[in-house]
Image (cartoon, rainbow, N blue to C red):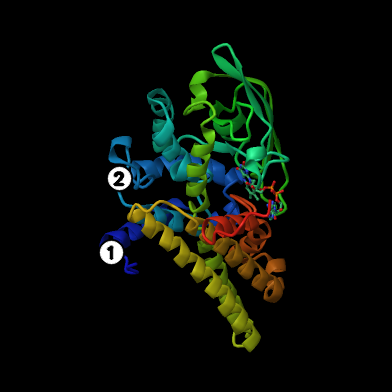
Amino acid sequence: MDFTWTPEQQDYRQHLRAFIARALPADWEAKSNYDPGSPYVVDFARDFCPALAAEGLLIPHWPVEHGGGGADPWFHWILGEEMFAVGEPRSYQYMNVNWIGPALLRYGSAAQQALHIPQITGGSVFWCQGFSEPSAGSDLAALKTRAERDGDGYVINGQKIWTSAASFASYCFLLARTGPTKRDISVFLVPMDTPGIEVREVMSLTGRRSLHEVFLTDVRVGEETRLGEENAGWAIVKAVLHNERIGAPRYIMAQRALDAAARVLRQDGRFDVPSIQAGLGKARAAVDACQLLCFRIIDGRMKNVSPGGETNVARYALALADRAVGDFIGEHLHDALLAREEQTILTQFRRAASTGLGAGAAEIQLDIVAQSFLELPRSH
Ligand SMILES: Cc1cc2nc3c(=O)[nH]c(=O)nc-3n(C[C@H](O)[C@H](O)[C@H](O)COP(=O)(O)OP(=O)(O)OC[C@H]3O[C@@H](n4cnc5c(N)ncnc54)[C@H](O)[C@@H]3O)c2cc1C
């Protein structure tokens, strides 16, 4: 793996930074709280994403025939790093770019692509992901939401939970059971204004405003909303989950929080205390290890290597890094947390409370690594 950024990649990063610096207001940090689901950031993204699209910066890595720049996966990664470093001003539109759009390009019919792709490439639409249910999180295949055949369409009944962005999304990438066996699952592209859909906000442990319950009662959708064949949703989900797990370079916020922590500790005259130095070093090592593991995945994408257990290793490393930095902040920076002056420190501390759950629990990543990498026997 070559660790040197090419001149083109460096230029691209500078271009992005200049664009972001022009676009974000001076009080961005205070107003956004680095929370992509906050009403302020969602509103901001409604102008920011079309502006990114007009500048050719929204989907650099998509195929040219679909409006992208045809750039390699490193450009996609650089885009993610720069966006996440400032708290994700695209709000949840980052999901469209990372995995919803690519899933539609791979599995969607011509009509589905004609409807959805221009909205995504124009930066004008929000999607949400309707996977998790009250008793189907880690064990996603246990989901109970059903889509029953009815004439030339389906009637969907069930409940989703932890659905980020559901209150402002136009469409849901929804999983529902369409057959008798555990894997008989299909994907539906459901307009969120379809009658029978009720969304309720769930207050998050971290204070964020983006989580919801979604209740589906006799929701009628046409057959044209189904993505791929009936009962073939599991293959789509597996491909999608790979892109979701390593889709956002979240370690960037941890890096920024550690930089802010070092600044505060210097001001307080505590930076040189040996136990603090050791703690900072350990946390930094965890973050850097995570970054390098993510780089391996991107390197694999460059070489068209099929994604394997490395994705799960990197996702687990992300949980470890987030927790290491969160723990360090909790132990040494309580005054800064209470003063609420350093938003990156506060954001990272809060995020660490839920990291290792979203996009697949940390323990489940270890389970998959045990089976797919180490070939250990299953316990049941
Ligand atoms: C910030 C955030 C945003 C989210 N956004 C979305 C979204 O937009 N759409 C969506 O569909 N979902 C979303 N989720 C839900 C997320 O996908 C689930 O939280 C995750 O899949 C875990 O499921 P669960 O919460 O039901 O926990 P559970 O599956 O009940 O797990 C609880 C604990 O038990 C452990 N555990 C469970 N099974 C095993 C096992 N076999 N071996 C060892 N340990 C085990 C887990 O590791 C975990 O620590 C979001 C979650 C978070 C935190």
Please state which amino acid type lies under the numbered disc 2: Gly
Residue 258 found in image quarter: bottom right
Q: Nearer the viewer, residue 351 or 22?
A: 351
Residue 348 found in image quarter: bottom right
Residue 8: x and y in percent read 27, 59
Residue at 42% x, 40% y is: 102
Q: Disc 2 designates what residue?
A: 69
Q: Say whether disc 1 or disc 2 marks the residue closer to the N-terminus.
A: 1
| 146 shown above or below 152 | below
Residue 48 visible in the current orientation: no
Residue at 33% x, 45% y is: 55
Residue 204: x and y in percent read 71, 49
Residue 47: x and y in percent read 46, 40
Residue at 52% x, 19% y is: 223
| 297 shown above or below 282 | above
Residue 31: x and y in percent read 59, 52
| 354 shown above or below 45 | below
Please state which amino acid type lies under the numbered disc 1: Thr
Numbered circles on residues, count: 2
Residue 39 visible in the current orientation: yes
Q: CA distance from mark 1 to mark 2?
A: 17 Å
Residue at 42% x, 62% y is: 295
Q: Taking 25 as reference, is 3 left or right?
A: left
Q: Taking 93 as reference, is 362 left or right?
A: right
Q: Secondary structure at mark 2?
A: loop
Q: Disc 1 designates what residue?
A: 6
Quadrant occupied by the N terminus: bottom left
| 34 shown above or below 346 | above
